[in-house]
Amino acid sequence: MKKLALLLTLLTTQAAAQSSALPGDPCHITTPCALGDRSYHVREPDGWDGVTPLPVMLHFHGWARTGALPVQHQRISGHTRRRDVLLVAPNGRNRTWNFRAGSPDVPFADAVLADVAARYPVDADRILISGYSFGSAMAWRFVCESGNDVRALIAVSGTLRRQGETCAEAPQEVRHVHGLDDTVMDFPMGPGGDVLHPVKLWRARLGCGAEQALGAYQVVSWLSFDRYVWDCAEGRVIYDLHPGGHFIPHGWIGRQLDEILGLPPRYP
């Protein structure tokens, strides 16, 4: 991903010189941006001036969906557009993702980021990778193979589970949320009922120490999260656990963006 980072910096400079996204380009929200034989969706933040470099959150959609859903979803785009974040949502082939090692969807996502940087002035130091369900597993795969320049992984209800999985690359920070009652992509309980097992891969990859249990917090009144944090030799892991099932929790993505971008926490 180092070559991609250099390319993003170059393209961002060029895009800033052009002052904005491509004028009159119909590629926006529900109209996909073509990229070879594939495509992605994009949504700008509210009130963007067309010039200021934008943090980017690339979000992988869930199984049987397309990128048109995240750019209209209140629990995803409802947060990015209020926080000056450019939301990018690639379309998976056959509405799904290949999140096995060596997946062709990894270089595709790299190409999407490069294409976005040719259209918009991008803050290359604040590239965020997100996903839900199958898309969360794909987000894990992407940062596992091309994540060294990713500011943070923001993952919801989906992991890589293969025994012996190793990651050549990793983001600066991992943020993952999972529900104990998830029966769609079953909660990956560890030996002896270890509820911290879902983020074991990243704890090992980043060289983490002992966890800090920070206790419960809420974004909305009807759902509480138990937060665990690991300070690591190569970054940090933050894990939020809730008692519910397979869904994107109200306000969770927004809270992660607030913390990552140094904004006052708010909802939505």
Image (cartoon, rainbow, N blue to C red):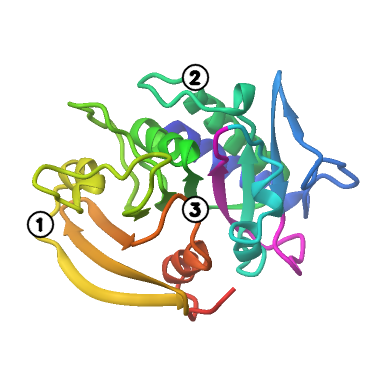
Residue name at image x 35 percent, y 53 percent: 181
Quarter of the image where one finds residue 101: top left
| Side of 137 relative to 215 (left or right) | right
Dot 2 or dot 1, earlier in sequence: 2
Task: State yes or no: discs 3 and 2 in contact (Cβ < 8 Å).
Answer: no
Query: From the viewer's perspective, is 181 left or right of 26?
Result: left
Residue under numbered circle 3: 247
Numbered circle sitting on residue 209 = 1
> Can you say whether 254 is above or below 164 in the image?
below
Report the residue at 34% width, 46% height from top: 171
Foreground pick, 60 / 243: 243
- The residues bearing labels 2 and 1 have C-alpha atoms spaced at a distance of 33 Å
Residue 262, given in percent of the width and then of the height, sits at 45, 73
Q: Position of residue 163 (x, y in %)?
A: 19, 27
Q: Is residue 32 left or right of residue 79?
A: right
- The residue tagged 2 is 104
Sequence-first tag of 3 and 1: 1
Location of residue 138 with respect to 243 vertically, above or below? above
Magenta region: 44-63
Mark 1: give few (<14), some (14-19) or many (20+) Cα within 10 Å.
some
Between the residue at mark 3 and the residue at mark 2, the CA separation in whole angstroms equals 27 Å
| Rendered residue at 66%/41% (across/down) | 116
Q: Is residue 50 magenta?
A: yes
